[in-house]
Image (cartoon, grey):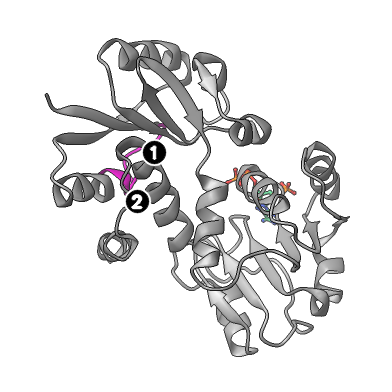
Amino acid sequence: MKKLYAVIGNPIGHSMSPIMHNDLFSFYQIDASYLPFQIKSEDLKDAVDGFKAIGIGGFNVTVPHKTAIIPLLDEVDELAASIGAVNTVVNENGRLKGYNTDGPGFLKGLQAFMSGAASKKILLIGAGGAARAIYFTLAMEKPDAIDIANRTVAKAQSLIDDCPYSVKSEACTLDEAGRKLGEYDLVVQTTSIGMAPKIADQPLDLSNIKKHSHVCDIIYNPLETKLLQDASNRGANVQNGIDMFVYQGALAFEKWTGIFPDVERMRENVLKQLG
Ligand code: ATR
C-alpha cells in the first residue's frame, strides 16, 4: 500500500520539500507520496493524531510547529530534545518519534566542503532557532571554541547557558565580532539578514576576516548573499544555505527509508525550483 509522508507548517505553500522527496521516492522506486499540509497551531494535536491514525510513514515539521510538536509525540531523541525543536518525525511501529536533522544537516553539508568543526575556532552569527540547532550540533564536534554574536547579546548568552554539551563560548555584539573576526576559521551566519527582498543587508563588517577562512550563510534566497559576496572577494571560501537544506532532507529521507539519497540530485532539483 502507498505510504504517506508530509510536511506541516504555516504557511507551507513555498516549501520545496514535496518536490525534493517525491522525486526521491520515484527515483528509488518507493511507493510513497509526500504532501504539504498547512496546519494552524490550534489544529496541531488533531493533525498529529490523524497522521498516527492513518499510519503515516513520517513527516517534516516547519515553522511555527517545531517546538510545539514535542509534547504531542511518543518519543523525542536526545539531540532534538536538547535543542527543543523537532523537524523530522518517524513512525516507528506505530510510535511517533521526533528528531532534529537541521543541525546534523548543516554539519554534513559543512563536511562535504571541509574537514568539519573539530579544533576550529567558530563564530556563530544569530541566536534564534536555527542558531540553536547548529550550535548544539557543532558543540559536540570538539571545536576549539564557538563564540556567538547577536544583536541582542543576552539571547546569545542564554543559548550558551542552555547548551548541554561542553564547549568554550563567549557572547558578543555584531560589532565586537567584526573587530575580532581574524580569530575565526569558520563563520556561520544564521539570521535572516541579507535574505530576499533585503539583499543589500549584511550583519557585520568583514575587513578583518582571516584569509582562507570558511564562511557559511544558511540563507539560499539569494544563493549568494552580500555577506558571501564580500567574503569571497576577500579570499574566504564560501558556502550557501542549499547544503543545509538538502542534507537535512537527505537525513530525514534516510530515517524514513534506510537509504541515504543522492544529494547531488537533490541539489539540482532544488536549484531548478529556485530558478
Ligand atoms: P530562526 O528561528 O529562523 O533562526 P529567529 O528565532 O526569529 O529565526 O531568530 C532570528 C535571529 O536573527 C536572531 O538572532 C535575531 O536577532 P535578535 O535575537 O537580536 O532578535 C536575528 N536578526 C533578525 N533580524 C535582524 C536584524 N535586522 N539585525 C540583527 N539581527 C537580526
* SS assignment at label 2: loop
Q: CA distance from mark 1 to mark 2?
A: 8 Å
- Eyeballing the image, is 6 above or below 116? above
Q: Which quadrant would residue 232 be assigned to in this image?
A: bottom right
Residue at image point 65% right, 89% down: 234
- Eyeballing the image, is 12 above or below 138? above
Residue 255 disc label: 1
Q: Residues within 10 Å of mark 2 (few under 14, many from 20)?
A: some
Residue 105 lies in the magenta stretch: no
Magenta stretch, residue numbers: 9-18
167 lies left or right of 98: right
Residue at image point 29% right, 39% down: 257
Residue 10 lies in the magenta stretch: yes
Point out residue 158 in the picture as x, y percentages from the top left corner: 82, 40
Q: Is mark 2 within 8 Å of ligand 1?
A: no
Dividing the image into 4 quarters, which one contains the N terminus?
top left
152 and 236: which is toward the camera: 236
269 lies left or right of 104: left
33 lies left or right of 142: left
Point out residue 139 in the picture as x, y percentages from the top left corner: 73, 51
Residue 260 disc label: 2
Dividing the image into 4 quarters, which one contains the C terminus?
bottom left
Residue at image point 49% right, 15% down: 74
